[in-house]
Image (tube, helix red, strand yellow):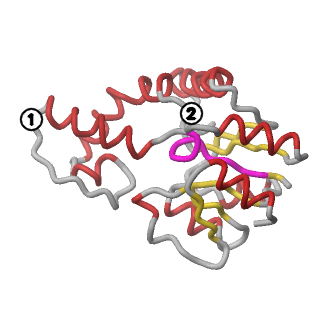
């Protein structure tokens, strides 16, 4: 089986990072907020305007990309899946190949280094657009592991999606959506034939 795997929210804990660093950003910038955990991005979570949202990620993206640790057992489970004969295809919308400038290239290199440092094995690494459905179809992905609600909804129209549980994706339900809560939960579902 060819398994597509997202990075942010699947291999990293994007949700907790945004809660922690979003609150700090608001504190440092004297921004009053109410946390809305049902929102996917920092702007929605803290009701930031577009300028504040951009400023947040300008300040923290590189730090996040370099320092955020892999979710427990992700590397171990990916090794098991590979040993079982599955192909691992990382598909991330982080700094797509459309961004041709030095910043885009730097961030793509940070992703590759992060995967190596966290012992995340893979057969292919695809920098995609945010809507990953066409990338999944073009790369013959049999199942996608994803956390982003729009991607879950879109991809699940054609192929099964393992929804890595987060507060912001609890509304995602459907015939092709399989909710999982940890990497060993994912492994057990795949081993059992999903």
Q: Is 120 a magenta residue?
A: no
- Residue 19, image quadrant: top left
Where the N terminus falls, by quadrant? bottom right
**Residue at point 68% right, 23% down?**
116
Region of the chain picked out in magenta, as a range: 3-11
Q: Which image quadrant is residue 122 in? A: top right
Tell which of 37 and 44 is nearer to you. 37
Q: Residue at x 73, y 68 (%)?
A: 159
Q: Is residue 53 above or below residue 111?
A: below
Q: Crowding near pointer 1: few (<14 within 10 Å), some, many (20+)?
A: few
Kindly identify the residue that appears in the image at 48 percent across and 29 percent down. 68
Q: Main secondary structure of the magenta part?
A: loop
Q: Earlier in the sequence, mark 1 or mark 2?
A: 1
Which residue is found at the position 66% from the left and 63% from the top?
A: 161
Image coords of residue 85 (percent x, y) = 90, 46
Q: How far from the left and from the top, in percent, is residue 84?
A: 88, 46
Q: Is residue 118 left or right of residue 58?
A: right
| Residue 11: percent from left, percent from top | 58, 40
* Residue in front for this viewpoint, 186 or 157: 186
Does residue 99 sit above or below 9 in this rendering? above
Q: Quadrant of the C terminus?
A: bottom right
The residue under label 1 is 30
Q: Which mark is residue 70?
A: 2
The secondary structure type at the circle numbered 1 is loop
Count of numbered marks: 2
* Percent coordinates x, y for residue 39 in the rendering: 34, 58
> Mark 1–mark 2 contact, CB under 8 Å?
no
Question: Element under label 2?
Answer: loop
Compared with 43, 111 (above or below) is: above
- Magenta-span inclusion, residue 5: yes
Furthest residue in direction bottom, as rendered: 175
**How far apart are labels 1 and 2 at the CA level?**
31 Å
């Amino acid at each position: 089986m060819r398994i597509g795997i997202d990075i942010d929210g699947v291999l990293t804990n994007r949700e907790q990072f945004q809660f922690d660093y979003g609150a700090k950003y608001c504190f440092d910038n004297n921004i009053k907020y109410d946390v809305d955990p049902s929102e996917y991005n920092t702007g929605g979570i803290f009701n930031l305007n577009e300028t504040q949202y951009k400023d947040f990620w300008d300040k923290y993206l590189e730090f996040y990309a370099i320092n955020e640790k892999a979710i427990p057992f992700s590397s171990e489970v990916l090794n098991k899946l590979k040993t079982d004969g599955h192909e691992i295809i990382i598909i991330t919308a982080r700094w797509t190949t459309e961004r041709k400038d030095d910043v885009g290239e730097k961030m793509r290199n940070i992703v590759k280094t992060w995967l190596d440092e966290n012992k995340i094995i893979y057969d292919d690494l695809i920098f995609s657009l945010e809507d990953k459905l066409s990338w999944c179809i073009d790369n013959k992905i049999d199942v996608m592991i994803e956390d982003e609600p729009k991607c879950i909804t879109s991809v699940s129209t054609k192929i099964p999606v393992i929804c890595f549980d987060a507060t912001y994706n609890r509304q995602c339900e459907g015939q092709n959506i399989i909710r999982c809560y940890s990497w060993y939960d994912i492994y057990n579902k795949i081993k059992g034939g999903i």
